Image (cartoon, rainbow, N blue to C red):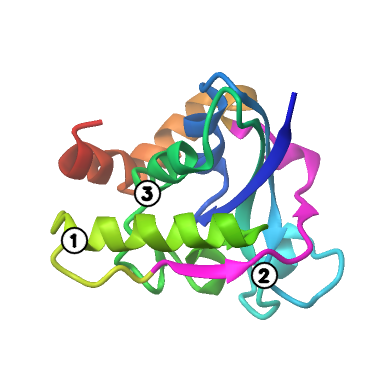
């Protein structure tokens, strides 16, 4: 079984686990922080928007069951890729979107998917999501892992209240 990594920053990491968790071939989805230079950041520190880190998920997957391109498609449908200042009501650098590539092939696939999304004219503003080389990924505190399973009521209230659920419904019918 071939294991690979995909790393995506899509705003609040609580809302980025569940969409990937349901796919065959995805073996784990870990919430964490990446992109900055501060070692061993905490949630509180990342939320200050001074570390360069973004909330992100790191996905382990078996590419014989699900491709990186399929994961990219899932990612794009979870975010507002035109928002350069965060996601929904979460603002600041720690909530900005990015695709962190681990290989040259991932970089090329990510760029191709971004161009295709822009060409689709689904959005009337430019795609702001960055495509960046993967950096060290720091696992978030245990309380943030699989939040949608541990705190389903709060998770659902947050996902709806933030505007994410309505946005996905309006843009993708999901």
Q: Position of residue 14 (x, y in %)?
A: 56, 42
**Are discs 1 and 3 less than 8 Å apart at CB?**
no
Q: Residue at x 38, y 59 (%)?
A: 112
Q: Position of residue 101 (x, y in %)?
A: 61, 60
Q: Which mark is residue 134?
A: none
| Secondary structure type for disc 3 | helix
In the rendered view, tell whether residue 145 sits above or below residue 100: above
Tag 3 or tag 1, which sits nearer the N-term? 3
Q: Which residues are magenta?
A: 129-147
In the rendered view, tell whether residue 92 sits above or below residue 22: below
Q: Quadrant of the C terminus?
A: top left
Please rate how many residues cluster around mark 3, counting C-alpha atoms within 10 Å: few if below 14, some from 14 to 19, many from 20: some
**Is residue 122 found left or right of 141 in the rendered image?**
left
| Secondary structure type for disc 1 | helix
Q: Residue at x 31, y 38 (%)?
A: 165
Image-quadrant location for residue 85? bottom left
**Are discs 1 and 2 less than 8 Å apart at CB?**
no
**Image label count:** 3
**Is residue 21 found left or right of 160 in the rendered image?**
right
Point out the residue furthest to the right here.
40
Q: Which mark is residue 119?
A: 1
Q: Position of residue 46 (x, y in %)?
A: 68, 67
In the rendered view, tell whether residue 15 sits above or below residue 43: above
Q: CA distance from mark 1 to mark 3?
A: 14 Å
Residue 69 is inside the magenta segment: no
In the rendered view, tell whether residue 114 sits above or below residue 79: below
Q: Which mark is residue 35?
A: 2
**Is residue 76 found left or right of 7 in the rendered image?**
left
Residue bearing mark 3: 76
Tag 2 or tag 1, which sits nearer the N-term? 2
| Secondary structure type for disc 2 | loop
Q: Nearer the viewer, residue 74 or 45?
A: 74
């Amino acid at each position: 079984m071939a294991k690979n990594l995909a790393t995506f920053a899509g705003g609040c990491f609580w809302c980025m686990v569940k969409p990937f968790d349901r796919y065959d071939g995805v073996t784990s989805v870990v919430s964490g922080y990446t992109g900055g230079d501060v070692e061993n950041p905490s949630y509180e520190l990342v939320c200050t928007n001074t570390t360069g880190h973004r909330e992100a998920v790191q996905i382990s997957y078996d590419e014989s069951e699900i491709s990186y391109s399929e994961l990219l498609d899932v990612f794009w449908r979870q975010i507002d890729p035109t928002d350069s200042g965060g996601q929904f009501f979460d603002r600041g650098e720690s909530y900005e979107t990015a695709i962190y590539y681990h290989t040259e092939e991932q970089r090329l696939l990510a760029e191709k998917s971004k161009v295709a999304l822009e060409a689709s004219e689904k959005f009337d503003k430019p795609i702001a999501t960055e495509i960046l080389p993967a950096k060290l990924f720091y696992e978030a505190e245990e309380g943030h892992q699989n939040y949608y399973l541990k705190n389903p009521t709060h998770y659902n209230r947050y996902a709806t209240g933030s505007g994410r659920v309505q946005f996905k419904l309006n843009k993708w019918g999901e």
